[in-house]
Amino acid sequence: MISTRGRYALRVLIDLAEHQDAGYIPMKQVAERQEISLKYLEQILPLLTRGKLIEGLHGKGGGYRLINPADRCRVGDVLRLTEGDLAPVACLGCDAKTCSRSKQCKTLPMWEMYYKITNDYFDHITIADLMKGPISE
């Protein structure tokens, strides 16, 4: 399941993309438009900054903006950054050690395929796609 942090991060990036012509956007404006508390944004924005999705400028005229165009910002990257991993089971997680049962596990191939499908799906959607409206096949 995708957490509130992941969902809000996508909303923030869409908002910044929709207002990119305004330059750096103050956090307060994004919070008001997206109805997200400033306190919660203060947790999300550093993640997006460290992930090199956005950059910030302090002081008068400061705020945040996308580093790359919205069509180069993949949803999969955002979700892996905010969620840590999209693995459906612990044994497929980034830091998982090889399970002693992996060679005889009858469900592992199913989980691996699900994981691949999930990553492929989200990696083919960009912030620009989300700005256009509903995603269809």
Image: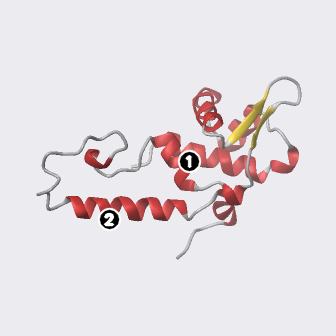
Residue positioned 62% across, 30% down in the render: 46
Judge the density around disc 1: few (<14), some (14-19), many (≥20) Cα neighbours within 10 Å. many
Residue positioned 68% across, 36% down in the render: 31
Q: Earlier in the sequence, mark 2 or mark 1?
A: 1
Q: Secondary structure at mark 2?
A: helix
Instruction: Describe residue 112's horizontal placement relative to residue 101 as left or right.
Output: right
Observer-nearest residue: 7 or 87?
A: 87
Residue positioned 51% across, 41% down in the render: 82
Instruction: Describe residue 121's horizontal placement relative to residue 66 as left or right.
Output: left
Q: Secondary structure at mark 1?
A: helix
The amino acid type, in three-letter code, at marker 1 is: Val
Mark nearer the viewer, 2 or 1? 2
| Residue 93 point in image, percent of width and height | 34, 45
| Residue 80 point in image, percent of width and height | 49, 46
Judge the density around disc 2: few (<14), some (14-19), many (≥20) Cα neighbours within 10 Å. few
Q: Which residue in the structure is indicated by mark 1?
A: 78
The dot on residue 113 is 2
Q: Quadrant of residue 44?
A: top right
The dot on residue 103 is none
Image height check: is 16 above or below 27? below
Instruction: Describe residue 69's horizontal placement relative to residue 114 as left or right.
Output: right
Number of residue marks: 2
Image height check: is 13 above or below 111? above
